[in-house]
Image (cartoon, grey):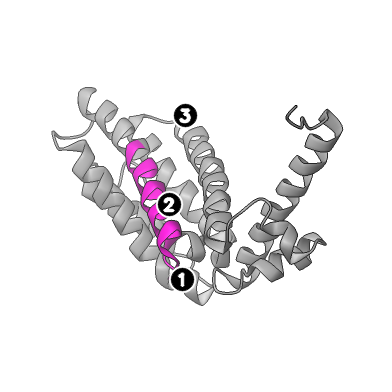
Amino acid sequence: MPYRRTPRVQARLDAQREALLAAAVALLSEQGYAGCSVAGVAARAGVSTGSVYRYFPGKAELVVEVFRGLVGREVQAVEDAANGPGDLIDRVVAIVETFANRALKAPRLAYALLAEPVDAPVEAERLVFRQVFQKAFAMHVTEAIKAGVLPAQDAGVTAAALVGAVAEVLVGPLSAGVASADTVPNLVRFTLRALGADDAAHS
């Protein structure tokens, strides 16, 4: 007869797994991907190194799971901002502002998410991360085009270009851990001009 875990045992295992993920987020925030070792995660979570391997084959798989959780959180944040007050163009701007401001508040973690050299499985997850944000941009750009408040354009291409531009603009400040006060306002102005919107009316 196959062994079946009791609810208490399963709850304990689930709690330990969550503790490992939280420890990995903390290490990524402090030391980036390079400093997020399996041994370091185990120590931060207060368990043996071998315990980590009960849940994840290695560091890359652990960080992939962390990325998925973080991306879900960031996507929810920008979607909430994009569904706030303002017109259709303001919703696209809200995505840029929210993502950039949140990234700059946690620069080491954001740098790990966006640009730090990582292993192949994590790089693959990073591409998914970018595609999710492209989809969010494209949806709101499409709505604005249909409403006639933005000129006709390929929303997918615009979204991809905006995601790439935002990431490129932020890489320097994130790697340095500091940004000038005009980084986000300049990024917003660029976004409006790239969309073909009146930046003066949405400054």
Upstream in the sequence, badge 2 or badge 3? 3
Pair 2/1: label in front:
2
User: Which is nearer the N-term, disc 2 or disc 1?
Assistant: 2
Q: Horizontally, is 95 left or right of 51 in the view?
A: left
Given the image, on which type of amino acid does mark 2 rest? Glu
Residue 117 versus residue 29: which sits nearer the camera? 117
Farthest-out residue, top? 147
- Left or right position of 152 against 27: left
Q: CA distance from mark 2 to mark 3?
A: 26 Å
Disc number placed over residue 44 in the picture, else none: none
* Disc 2: which residue: 125
User: From this viewpoint, which residue is outermost toward the right?
Assistant: 8
Give the residue furthest to the bottom: 176
Residue at x 30% of width, y 56% of height: 164
Count residues near mark 2 (Cα–Cα under 10 Å), then give few for <14, some for 14-19, many for 20+.
Answer: some
Q: Amino acid at mark 3?
A: Asn
| Quarter holding residue 137 | top left
| Residue 104 location (% of width, % of height) | 53, 61
Disc marking residue 173: 1
- Residue 42 placement (x, y as % from top left): 74, 64
Residue 22, relative to residue 42: is it above or below? above
Element at label 3 = loop
Q: Is residue 125 left or right of residue 156?
A: right
Q: CA distance from mark 2 to mark 1?
A: 23 Å
Q: Which residues are magenta?
A: 114-135
Residue where numbered disc 3 is placed: 83
Residue 151 visible: yes
